[in-house]
Amino acid sequence: MRFGHFDDARREYVITTPKTPYPWINYLGSEQFFGLVSHQGGGYCFYRDARLRRLTRYRYNNVPTDSGGRYFYINEGGDTWTPTFMPMKKELSFFECRHGLGYTQITGTRNGLRAEVLYFVPIGQTAEVHQVTLKNEGSTPKRFKLFSFVEFCLWNAHDDATNFQRNFSTGEVEVVGSTIYHKTEYRERRDHFAFYHVNAQVSGFDTDRESFIGLYNGFGDPDVPSAGESKNTVASGWSPIASHGLDVTLAPGEEKKFVFLLGYVENPRAEKWEKPGIINKTRAEQLIAAFSSSEQVTAALGKLREHWEGLLSNYAVESGDEKLNRMVNIWNPYQCMVTFNMSRSASYFESGIGRGMGFRDSNQDLLGFVHLVPERARERIIDIASTQFADGSAYHQYQPLTKRGNNDVGSGFNDDPLWLILGVSAYIKETGDYGILDEQVPFDNDPNNAATLLEHLKRSFDHVGHNLGPHGLPLIGRADWNDCLNLNCFSETPDESFQTTGNRTGRTAESVFIAGMFVHIGPDYAKICEYKGQSAEATRARAEVAKMERAVLEHGWDGEWFLRAYDFFGNKIGSKDCPEGDSKILIEPQGYCVMAGIGVATGEAKLALDSVKERLDTRYGIVLNNPPYRDYHVELGEISSYPPGYKENAGIFCHNNPWVMIAETVIGRGERAFEYYKKIAPAYLEDISEIHRTEPYVYSQMIAGKDAPRHGEAKNSWLTGTGSWNFVAISQYMLGVRPEWDGLCVKPCIGKEVPEFTVTRKCRGATYRIHVKSTGGTGQVKLVVDGKPIEGVIVPFAKPGSTVHIECEAS
Ligand code: GLC
Ligand code: GLC
């Protein structure tokens, strides 16, 4: 069942009923000011850091689900309603939500009054625009009240949700004309404040939540809108809000626009005050002046559209499959940009106070956005590498506001350092900027202990080599890519974190997955060393990679698939020999080892992927492991804590499915890769939205596996490495266009189902137009470049400004 449709020409998803199976959200902002907005106007915003600088309040896991947002209430002759449907839930004769790239527009009509709210963050600004357009579609004049509503968060979202003995007494505001200033804690150590403004004269205002809503009411039946009169309250302690009351009249057919602006301002400490106790508002007034008319709003929206058009033009496909086109050209890169901005911090499943930026996650996200914003990718790489420890290991995450590593999820995830090599390689292949390797980058943010980025990569590489176990395979540490495979944790106590507890410190538990990664990523490190003239180091690296490959085939092969790991006691994980009730096969090493080329020449690769098909594939995607763990295993940790079929215990983890897709292209089975692709790509799931439940325009982290009662139901949409890896799988391996060290690799492997397509790829300033005839999916290609046949699959990089025409026959 569908709840809307794609509007590809406008790059929007159009939701046509408020009653979607779950709140379907969008993101605003891509620089410093960010917002989340659901199709019902729910959500919140923050400046840079969802935990430390939260501007408006949101209640997670609430009743009803989507509680709190930027709401507008209309009272026409005693009939009070909200055009976003929530929170008043009054019947609407028309409802539509258009989620576009960086903006959302929600329209509701009742009694012939059409109210449209447009939400976006203008480029270069630290503010959200809420433009309300009201139209009288009836034949008689209308006179009604409009009330705005936002509820301020007292900045630190964690403190705001827990420390009530203090923060019920700290709230402060100022009201001047049509602007409400939120200045809690500004009197002491904060140099920033927020404001909510409207470009019209107000008939009243409110800033005290209890007065506006009423102590025993909710957002759905608030006092002031229902009574139709603002109370002009000035908050003192408790919960500050901002609400404007406006009198509106509309002749038949008439339309009026109001521009509301929710802004954030920082003042230099010496310029904080206008006079004692009164905030210096100069900067706020400048921001307000920039959005005082709807013409300014239209212009800013135009700029936002241009911005996205520019970004998305870096990779585009034209094919006969409209679902494929919309995933590759619009929604998948859009999701990648959102993960660039948010990492795993703020979504409707990530509370914004739990996780900062992941070391591993951010490096993988980079694969999906490096071609869109290479300069910002460069900065991101330096930020990430600056949190690395001198021994090559890493904090598992860091805080975006301070850019420092934090210990909340600890460290010692032994795959982490390798992802840095992957990220840096992707960046250099995209840009040719080898200069980044010479940047001086601190360890653990200590400026007195710095080395070149190249040295950071060496330590990343060696961190694996220096930490091998009894079989010559890498020690897993706390966990590897699978945060829930905690082989040294041995937790028997509730409330202990699986990610930070290590009750045993063994040097025995080994990961075949990390070994596969090492073989996959090691050659890139060697290539980098070669470019830097370090040929001895390159030779050493290649030798270590070759040794690791042998170790995988010798100790990491189970006969029909790759083993997953050895536990603390040296027992096999993911083996045909594992006892009943335990998993016999896990997905990660099958995908990753084959991506690395292990066993391709000798047949193990094909066997492993056939085992994936036979044992892990389902109608909704490939499950992580099979059979699921039935009981809690103290020696395995969190993986066995989940009920069968959910999350890392046999859920369909959409992040690692693309490894199998890529692996299938490595052995020349493009048709199967594409079959897997379509199973989890959201645009192909639109028709089963009632089962899938999350947004049909973005990937979710997990879909319940075949052992779960709710097989096919997705959770944790938006912030997942799934976005970038699926983009890599489809754009670089199936459609087959990717920058390599010496040129653009063109090697489609998708099969007959997409018989003809054209890819336009911009890279290093040149444009490549690649026309592909695809008669088979074996990965065999013939290329004609600007009229001349070439050998192989690498098209040399062309001069900036030039356009290269490529004809490709893929069979
Ligand atoms: C989550 C984490 C990611 C991890 C994955 C598997 O998505 O963000 O880092 O690899 O789970 O546990
Ligand atoms: C939980 C989740 C996993 C996530 C981890 C990070 O273990 O299952 O997906 O990566 O938390 O803290």
Image (tube, rainbow, N blue to C red):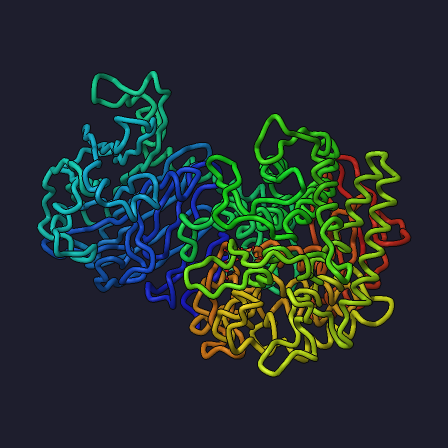
Question: Does the image show residue 683?
Answer: no
Horizontal side, residue 323 vs residue 759: left or right: left
Q: Tell which of 216 and 577 is nearer to you.
A: 577
Q: Tell which of 653 and 474 is nearer to you.
A: 474
Above or below for 704 versus 696: below
Q: Quadrant of the C terminus?
A: bottom right
Rendered residue at 43%/50% (across/down): 354
Above or below for 307 versus 442: below
Rendered residue at 58%/30% (across/down): 446
Q: Quadrant of the N terminus?
A: bottom left
Q: In which quadrant of the rendered view does residue 32 lie?
A: top left
- Give residue 320's position: percent from left, percent from top: 64, 64
- Give residue 353's position: percent from left, percent from top: 40, 48
Q: Tell which of 7 and 238 is nearer to you.
A: 238
- Give residue 30's position: percent from left, percent from top: 48, 41
Rendered residue at 77%/45% (across/down): 525
Question: Does the image show residue 621?
Answer: yes
Q: In which quadrant of the rendered view does residue 150 lie?
A: top left
Rendered residue at 25%/42% (across/down): 256
Above or below for 466 versus 672: above
Horizontal side, residue 82 vs residue 498: left or right: left
Tell me how many marks there are: 0
- Give residue 534's position: percent from left, percent from top: 85, 36
Horizontal side, residue 222 vs residue 595: left or right: left
Horizontal side, residue 318 vs residue 556: left or right: left
